[in-house]
């Protein structure tokens, strides 16, 4: 799967231009994608409903909280 990345922006809407920050963000996303794919495949092998599993993963993402607010 090819991951398509957005243009990353800060809270003011300005483009994040630091190459190192972008690199770290992309590496983290690639790791997350691989972990999620592994979890999904394991769930299918365990006979868990794929639709339910996707809904649960989406709810995990929706409930992420900013610890810096």
Image (cartoon, helix red, strand yellow):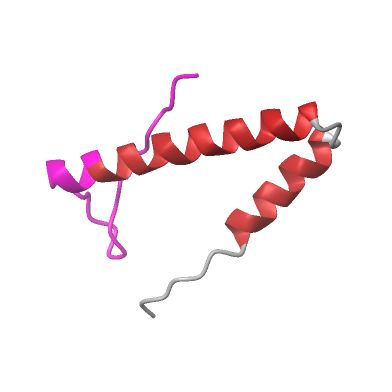
Give coordinates of residue 46: x percent, y percent: 81, 33
The structure residue drawn at horizontal position 14% and vertical position 41%, both measured from the top left corner, is: 19
Q: Is residue 3 magenta?
A: yes
Give coordinates of residue 18: x percent, y percent: 13, 47
Q: Can the viewer see residue 34 in this picture?
A: yes
Instruction: Name the foreground residue: 30 vs 42.
Output: 42
Query: Does 60 appear above or below 55?
Result: below
Give coordinates of residue 3: x percent, y percent: 43, 27
| Magenta: main secondary structure | loop
Give coordinates of residue 36: x percent, y percent: 58, 38
On screen, residue 20 versus residue 60, left or right, reads left
The structure residue drawn at horizontal position 23% and vertical position 55%, both measured from the top left corner, is: 14
Q: Can the viewer see residue 7 in this picture?
A: no
Q: Where does the magenta region start and end?
A: 1-23
On screen, residue 13 versus residue 60, left or right, reads left
Instruction: Name the foreground residue: 66 vs 39.
Output: 39
On screen, residue 64 versus residue 50, left or right, reads left
**Res. 5 image quadrant:** top left
**Res. 67 image quadrant:** bottom left
**Res. 24 image quadrant:** top left
Query: Does 44 appear above or below 12?
Result: above
The structure residue drawn at horizontal position 76% and vertical position 42%, both measured from the top left corner, is: 53
């Amino acid at each position: 799967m090819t991951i398509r990345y957005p243009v990353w922006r800060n809270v003011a809407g300005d483009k994040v231009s630091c190459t190192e920050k972008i690199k770290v963000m992309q590496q983290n996303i690639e790791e997350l994608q691989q972990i999620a794919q592994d979890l999904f495949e394991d769930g299918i092998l365990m006979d868990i409903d794929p639709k339910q599993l996707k809904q649960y993963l989406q709810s995990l993402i929706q409930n992420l909280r900013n610890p810096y607010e």
